[in-house]
Amino acid sequence: MKSDSVLPSICYGGDYNPEQWPEEVWHEDAQLMRKAGVNLISVGIFGWSKLEPQEGKYDFGWLDTVMDILYKHGVYVNLATATATTPAWFVKKYPDSLPVDRNGVRSFNGSRQHYCPNHPHLLEHMKTLVRALAEHFKEHPALKMWHVNNEYACHVSRCYCENCARSFRTWLQERYQSIERLNECWGTNFWGQRYNDWEEINPPRKTPTFVNPSQELDYYRFMNDAIFKLFAAEKEILREITPDVPLSTNFMSSFKPLDYFSWAQEVDIVTWDSYPDPREGLPINHAMMSDLMRSLRGGQPFLLMEQVTSHVNWRDINVPKPPGVMRLWSYSTIGRGADGIMFFQWRQSRAGAEKFHGAMVSHSGDDQSRVYREVKELGHELQKLDELVGSRVKSEVAILFDWENWWAVELDSKPHNKLNYISIVEDYYRELYKRNIRVDFARPQDDVSAYKVVIAPLLYMMKEGEEENLKRYVRDGGTLLVSFFSGIVNENDHVHLGGYPAPLRDILGICVEEWVPFAEEQSNFLQDGGETYRCTTWADIIRLEGAEPLALFGEEWYVGSPAVTVHRFGKGKGIYVGTRPESRYLGRLMESILKERDITPALQVPAKVEVTERYTDKERYVVIVNHNAHPVRITLPADETFLNVFNGKKHDKELTVKGIDAVVLKKRRRT
Ligand code: GAL
């Protein structure tokens, strides 16, 4: 891809399923799209059975017509490779392509994504289709981007069939080379699990009790790799036939089965889907995921490929976004690095499981609905933001995030089996979000030297090289904050011996002697100076080895023992939080760290107002999103004048933002 962006403008549009509609509707659609400012549409995602109705017989004619119509209306196409659902003829021919769960139960077709990623004929059929499609459409002027498959692994992230068992054995041979090495890395002397031969090894199917955790962990790795291979094969063909067309596959943000950090290195631009529940109020998790998705490719802007205008159909109760909220959340995403706002889907389906899912055009089919009006307003407004395309976000804080660690920490047979990685990460993120501090995510092995503060929540697994990396970071002056249950195992899920958290003890100046996981109804409290704060989930029994206590436990048999500590290491500091403190405490701790490291938000604003910034070489853009129903007055920095990008008005000294409203300001950067 020549530049970071797909279009020179903010991409705006959604998934489009013309195959569900007669041709006259395609013309209406294109007109409505143009009217709404739509410039990019994802087409053909579930199109395999229409594009190849019989094996080897292709029908691209209808898609030619659709793409011609769209192009005539100034709408470009994000063309799907259509491999997301195998057609019924394929299933009939290869019934063993249907996936099998860990209990040995095979799924049927009749919904979508019903394929085993390791089926020997799947890849060959997918490749033939993709090649034919790419050859046919390579010169089409509407083609702007490839949408490979769709939400890989969304419904079937693991299959346990015999084909998978065979592929797993091959994968293990490549990884371990010898059966002895595998026995060592899986710790098979435990419970007499030793293997003499690769053929004796199975996927971690249903077992009488806990399966070997190292085996389970490898199955996560193996399935991630197996599904990735499908993507890589399509990518190779598309690169060969259309080397200049950028390609992506839509991620699902905090989707556990796929290691998006590694996947992201293979796409041209990160695209992802997000469906926060409007009942949650502030979209904190969505903001966190936007920051994570941006971080996957080192801060490159991304496309929000799917969100919904109003309501989904797959929750127990599908509450719509109230008026204005879709726009608001779109701006929250833009402020965090989106160069595109897209929806699932363009036109609400008439039939099928998603007929009650919201869309840009509702069942009324016209331009009168509240939702379409909002879609149109946003589309036109976004055209004023084209200058933002390609601009970057800058952060001074990073949170460490690692998929393999996530897999490992949530495996069973732990001291606490209800630890939820994402929610512990979110504990820390939330405090930064509330204070409008920009955050990136990084892997524990990444170079984090550019950040003033690095936070490592629940970094249970520490792999080779990570200890050295973090030591270097702190030694050179960084502030590292580590939560409980970190630095416990290596990449095989074997304990780092020598006192917890062995790889972090030097940095933190502590030794954790025992763990006290709490029952759900239990809590303790922290004493910090004269104040007390609630803490839940977990208490570490900490022995100080040079660290100073910042807070002590307030009760139980370990009353008075350190709960939060700080330690100087080289030029930096290691802070340890040996419990799960309430937000009031974490917020306070965070504020003291931010103050010490001189990290400040772009603007001081009232609660529930998001402020984010994006930079080009010359301009600084400030995106302000007021989630309150009431207006807020914001003081602007003294002697700075900002330009309102929507209406060209100048603002200095102060600015009022209406309730449920967003404003984008810009300021020329001093050089
Ligand atoms: C996504 C999927 C879309 C649609 C949408 C509904 O997961 O990619 O095809 O099903 O969810 O919310």
Image (cartoon, helix red, strand yellow):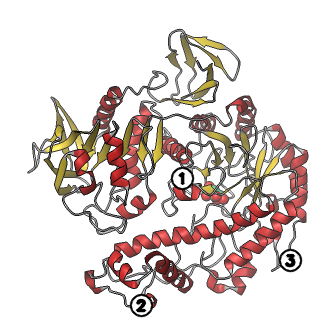
Residue 652 visible in rendering: yes
Write down which quadrant ligand 1 falls in. Answer: bottom right
Identity of the amino acid at label 3?
A: Lys
Q: Which mark is residue 197?
A: 2
Residue on which disc 1 sits: 253
Looking at the image, residue 619 lies above or below residue 104 = above
- Which callout, 2 or 1, points at the residue further toward the start of the chain? 2
Are the residues at dot 2 and dot 1 in contact (C-beta closer than 8 Å)?
Answer: no
Give me the residue at 56% from left, 55% from top.
Answer: 252
Identity of the amino acid at label 2?
A: Asp
Q: Is mark 2 within 8 Å of ligand 1?
A: no
Q: Which mark is residue 57?
A: 3
Sort mark 3 into few (<14), some (14-19) or many (20+) by Cα contacts within 10 Å.
few
Looking at the image, residue 290 lies above or below residue 409 = above
Give me the residue at 38% from left, 25% from top.
Answer: 598
Place of residue 582 in the rendered image (x, y in percent of width and height, measured from the top left): 29, 40
Place of residue 586 in the rendered image (x, y in percent of width and height, measured from the top left): 30, 37
Residue 458 visible in rendering: no
Looking at the image, residue 573 lies above or below residue 518 = above
Q: Quadrant of the C terminus?
A: top right
Identity of the amino acid at label 1?
A: Ser
Indicate which label's residue lies in the foreground, 2 or 3. Answer: 2
